[in-house]
Amino acid sequence: MKLSWTYGALAGLLLLAAYPAAAQQAPRPPGWAIATAHPLATDAGVEIARAGGNAFDAAVAVSAALAVVEPMGSGMGGGGFWLLHRAADGHRVMVDGRERAPQRAHRDIYLDAAGNVRPRASLDGPLAAAIPGQPAALVHIAARYGRLPLARSLVPAIRFARDGFPVTERYRRLVKMRMAAFNTSAGRVYLIDGEVPDVGDVIKQPDLASTLTRIADEGAAGFYAGPLARRLVEGVSAHGGIWGADDLSGYQVVEREPISGTYRDIEVTSAAPPSSGGIVLMAMLNMLERWNMNRVTEVERVHRIVESMRRAYRDRALYLGDPDFVAIDSGRLTSKDYARALSDDIGAGATPSRELDPPRGEGRDTTHFSILDPAGNRVAATLSINYPFGSGFMVAGTGVLLNNEMDDFVAKPGVANVYGLIGGQANAIAPGKRPLSSMTPTFLETKDTVVVLGTPGGSRIISMVLLASLKFAQGAHDAEQLVTLPRFHHQYVPDQIVFEPDAIAQATLVGLKLKGHALKRRDSPYGNMQAVIWRKREHRLQAASDPRGEGSAVVLLDASR
């Protein structure tokens, strides 16, 4: 784990010591705090800070940079959710840049003649790709919330695409995992002479640089109309996909009211549907609020957290989908009374998931960044192309790697997706519909402290944010503590507690088994949390990047240097 104060390739974790300052009625942060999943993306954010931009400009720069240097997690062929807080007027909004199903998509598109799900049909190749939302979202954020022109904020990403970025061990590992799904164009970009590149080899993407330049010059029309759009549609159609020109030209970003609630004295703001993150997070916190978690044994603490996860993920499968297509009673699902009713039957032992009302009928990767600027503006953004390297399909001449977010829909009620999540009709495939997501960009706020955090991790995203939120509620106001916290997870089905190596003590595991819980130890850690913290009373900023990943965090007190 490396610490750094410099502008450059920062790796690991940086924490800033307290800086005394006179208390103000309306305090402002003493500088910038930026945490991203890749050092070059952090550099991009710092560059835009020094160019006079605000947190929203930096978010555009970081998003685009991650699309270049972390293609396994996000990209211009994907989408995401950007949770924004504008300090000047307290405006909070979730910018929904989630992908949409093509107009020719239908409920049974991935089923064979016998009604069974065709293996990998929603994972590999262009048929797995929904219509990207990230390009439109970046244009939208720059125009409505930014201070700098879009073209300036895209400069770092264009440079990284043109000049290249060095291969890391993580990149190499994930390329090896997914290279069998690459089409010829993707293989030419991400491999070297058809082989997995070595650490330190440089990956250049001139076609992607041209695409980013076109967006910088023409805005959304540069991607969703004109020559690039025609090339995307033709390339997808030629290889079995179902995109049409109207799918691209008709894509719209949606601004949605975030999910909000409280856990004890903490104000929680998180992602709204079509992300399940905010509702599931608040449901779990509401259930757990009835107990003093500091006064129970470790076995009982984990047991109650797991039982809350079980019930909230059950409701995810039952009720949640795209709010433009299905009615979602968010108020009820996030109410304290409903949570009490849900948790009334949490007893001394594990509740088998099969005994709860069954449903009728993300990615291992993804990416996240957190940003806070000196005005108090903040952004928590989780972006994705779903599985590592998405569908593996790149349209020739564009540099755009397509997502496989169609796998986040329910291909068949009760049949799990690649992350083991099941669902029903609320998340069934329909033309123009956005698939349900687990992305959970979140703000936590007390009178004296602001936390901006999130993580990739597929179905485990929400439980990771829950554990960090509970740790913060216990008094851990240190960014490093939040991102390094050991992790465990339950998602209703499969009925098991999944946990990181050494995340749960052996004695606790024995106690959980006696309560009837099934346990599954992972061979490796998971998640890649990025967090920034502003401690107002102490006039102190912190930024932390999860040591499980390869990201970087920086606090910048003087952006003019």
Image: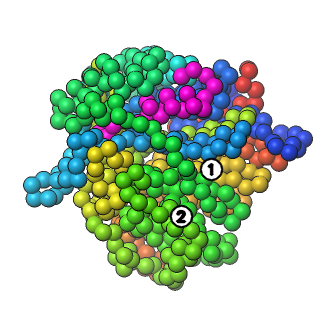
User: Can residue 361 be seen from the camera position used here?
Assistant: yes
Magenta-highlighted residues:
128-150
Residue at 60 percent across and 57 percent down: it is: 260
Is residue 545 left or right of 391 when viewed as pictured?
right
Q: CA distance from mark 1 to mark 2?
A: 19 Å
Q: Report whether 468 appears left or right of 555.
A: left
Q: Secondary structure at mark 2?
A: helix
Q: Nearer the viewer, mark 1 or mark 2?
A: 2
In the image, 494 versus 63, the foreground residue is: 63
Element marked by disc 1:
strand
Q: Main secondary structure of the magenta part?
A: helix
Query: Is any part of residue 66 visible from this angle?
Result: no
Name the amino acid, label 2: Gly
Please tell me which residue is depicted at 65% across the width and 53% down the height of the picture.
444
Q: Nearer the viewer, residue 59 or 305?
A: 59
Q: On the rendered image, what quadrant is the N terminus found in?
A: top right
Residue 23 magenta-highlighted: no
Q: Which mark is residue 331?
A: 2
Circle 1 crowding by C-alpha within 10 Å: few under 14, some 14–19, many from 20: many
**Label drawn at residue 443:** 1
